[in-house]
């Protein structure tokens, strides 16, 4: 692959490649015939210091047709449990890490191409990506970021000018993804299953240095690493639950050590509240259903802990297991603390210095039970509560009045709010600040992706992105972006896109 003799404003670093040989395979992107920039994330580009790169040149660089100066593409190796079944070698089958770049504040980021051709880890796949799934990943990453949820983000989507064969030929594309790193639970599993203790220690030390440098001062930094990852994942999953996000494929190779949402494949957002909600076409048993996500996160953390046993204590395995188990057993309480705090805020209730009180926890659970019983829209329910608290009719924003069946719960909730002495309108404003009115509604996402992929019309996608960039501010001209999926539109199923 030729290296472009053209300006690239940010120098690449290669700390992963230099520190962790054996955890990747050097590889080159597949050539593409006619790269064309479809979407470009200008705000992210500015943050990364890439704002001056000309558009035609970006299409060359971010499709892999030419390598930017200093790039050294590698396919990352990892293992993973996929739907509970272990595969000792997965890896980037259709993706390449070009290198790391520092943003304008000095923070290090991975720049990664997805859909750049088959690698040695491709396992028979073509290594390519279709335009629709890459646009979905761009859209979802931006939506999650605007919601305040840690996420990988897309820098650009580039059409390749060639077709990829799925059930039918689809326009091809390459996504350029930015992440704090691409170290996963599966990265640790890749070395642990090979009994390569030296490289496993190198990986753990690199992870600590890159993501959690404060842990180097701990008496046992590897035990502290599990603790820190556990805390990050507990908060991340609580944030997912708070907006009704369903990842769809929470395999261990899709759990980031940096506690970022990664790999938006068959993901979707829940409309009607039901903990059993599943959208992924391959999740036949509901392993990764909305209500199962906390349990699966803990299961994945157990797999990470298994890898860390020889690092935590290399002379006494039973002692190491006991220490790690003690940390793992904290997960339900840590998750519950984050979940209760976030959902209390969604209901306008403030925790005390001691945490969330039992009355608030009961109100949260009773409200969710009410939503499930009446098949209410999860996202709009919290906005309707705020509207009710203001005492205003906001049907012009798409918010219907509260039904009479909510009255018993509603009286208890309002009594609890009034006991704080805070003005109801202030409470309602605070609720609106943490309860989105706009999420990536599944029918709107599919409508936008279909227009872009099959008609070359980016208008619906750009309009949807514009609403999702400001998900908390209701607009009277945007009711269609807040309304639930039409009853005659489902059932909705999502696919991995490979």
Image: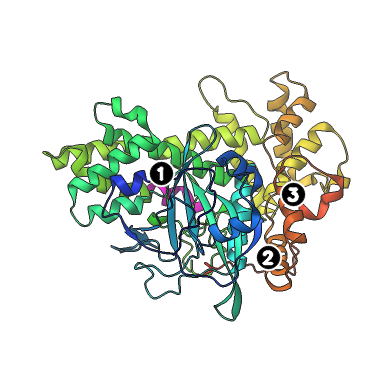
Pick whichever of labels 1 and 2 is earlier in the sequence: 1
Q: Decide: is 235 above or below 83.
A: above
Q: Is residue 423 above or below residue 282?
A: above
Residue name at image x 74 percent, y 72 percent: 455
Q: How many marks?
A: 3
SS category of the residue bearing label 3? helix
Between 374 and 224, the residue placed more toward the observer is 224
Q: Which residue is mark 1?
A: 13
Structural distance between the alpha carbons of marks 3 and 1: 33 Å
Q: Residues within 10 Å of mark 1 (few under 14, many from 20)?
A: some
Q: Which mark is residue 206?
A: none
Distance of label 2 from label 3 (alpha carbons):
15 Å
Of circles 1 and 2, the one toward us is: 1
Is residue 153 or residue 57 the one in the foreground?
A: 57
Q: Quadrant of residue 55?
A: bottom right
Relative to 453, residue 480 above or below: above
**Which mark is on residue 449?**
2
Choose the circle earlier in sequence order: 2 or 3: 2
- Residue 292 colored magenta? yes
Magenta region: 291-298
- Quick one: label 3, few (<14), some, or many (20+) residues within 10 Å? few
Question: Which of the labelled discs sits on residue 466, or is there none?
Answer: 3
* CA–CA distance in space, label 1 to label 2: 34 Å
């Amino acid at each position: 692959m030729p290296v472009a003799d053209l300006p690239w404003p940010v120098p690449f670093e290669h700390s992963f490649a230099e520190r962790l040989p054996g955890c990747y395979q050097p590889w080159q992107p597949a050539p593409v015939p006619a790269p064309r920039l479809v979407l470009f994330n200008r705000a992210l580009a500015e943050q990364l210091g890439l704002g001056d790169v000309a558009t035609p040149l970006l299409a060359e660089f971010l499709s892999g047709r030419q390598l930017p100066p200093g790039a050294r593409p590698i396919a990352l190796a990892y293992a993973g449990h996929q739907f509970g079944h272990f595969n000792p070698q997965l890896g980037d089958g259709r993706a390449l890490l070009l290198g790391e770049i520092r943003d304008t504040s000095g923070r290090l980021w991975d720049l990664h191409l997805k859909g750049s051709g088959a690698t040695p880890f491709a396992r028979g796949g073509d290594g390519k990506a279709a335009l629709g799934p890459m646009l979905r990943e761009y859209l979802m990453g931006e939506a999650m970021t605007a919601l305040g949820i840690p996420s990988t983000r897309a820098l650009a989507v580039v059409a390749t000018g060639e077709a990829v064969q799925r059930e039918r030929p689809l326009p091809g594309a390459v996504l350029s993804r930015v992440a704090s790193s691409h170290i996963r639970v599966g990265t640790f599993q890749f070395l642990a299953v090979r009994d390569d203790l030296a490289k496993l220690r190198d990986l753990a030390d690199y992870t600590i240095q890159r993501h959690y440098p404060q842990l180097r001062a701990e008496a046992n930094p590897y035990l502290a690493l599990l603790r820190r990852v556990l805390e990050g994942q507990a908060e991340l999953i609580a944030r997912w639950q708070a907006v009704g996000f369903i990842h769809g494929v929470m395999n261990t190779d899709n759990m980031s050590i940096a506690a970022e949402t990664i790999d938006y494949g068959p993901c979707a957002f829940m409309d009607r509240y039901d903990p059993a909600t599943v959208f992924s076409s391959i999740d036949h048993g509901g392993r990764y259903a909305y209500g199962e996500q906390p349990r699966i996160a803990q299961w994945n953390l157990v797999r990470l802990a298994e890898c860390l046993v020889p690092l935590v204590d290399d002379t006494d395995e039973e002692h190491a297991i006991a220490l790690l188990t003690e940390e793992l057993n904290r997960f339900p309480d840590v998750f519950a603390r984050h979940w209760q705090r976030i959902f209390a805020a969604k209901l306008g209730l403030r925790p005390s210095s001691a945490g969330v009180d039992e009355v608030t926890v009961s109100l949260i659970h009773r409200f969710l039970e009410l939503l499930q019983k009446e098949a209410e829209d999860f996202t709009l329910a919290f906005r309707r509560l705020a509207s009710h608290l203001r005492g205003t009719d906001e049907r012009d924003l798409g918010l219907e009045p509260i039904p009479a069946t909510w009255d018993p719960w509603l009286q208890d909730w309002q009594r609890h709010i009034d006991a704080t002495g805070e003005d109801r309108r202030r409470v309602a404003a605070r609720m609106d600040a943490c309860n989105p009115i706009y999420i990536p509604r599944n029918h709107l996402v599919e409508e936008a992706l279909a227009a872009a992929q099959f008609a070359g019309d980016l208008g619906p996608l750009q309009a949807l992105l514009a609403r999702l960039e400001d998900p908390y501010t209701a607009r009277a001209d945007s009711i269609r972006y807040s309304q639930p999926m039409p009853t005659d539109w489902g059932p909705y199923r999502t696919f991995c896109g490979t």
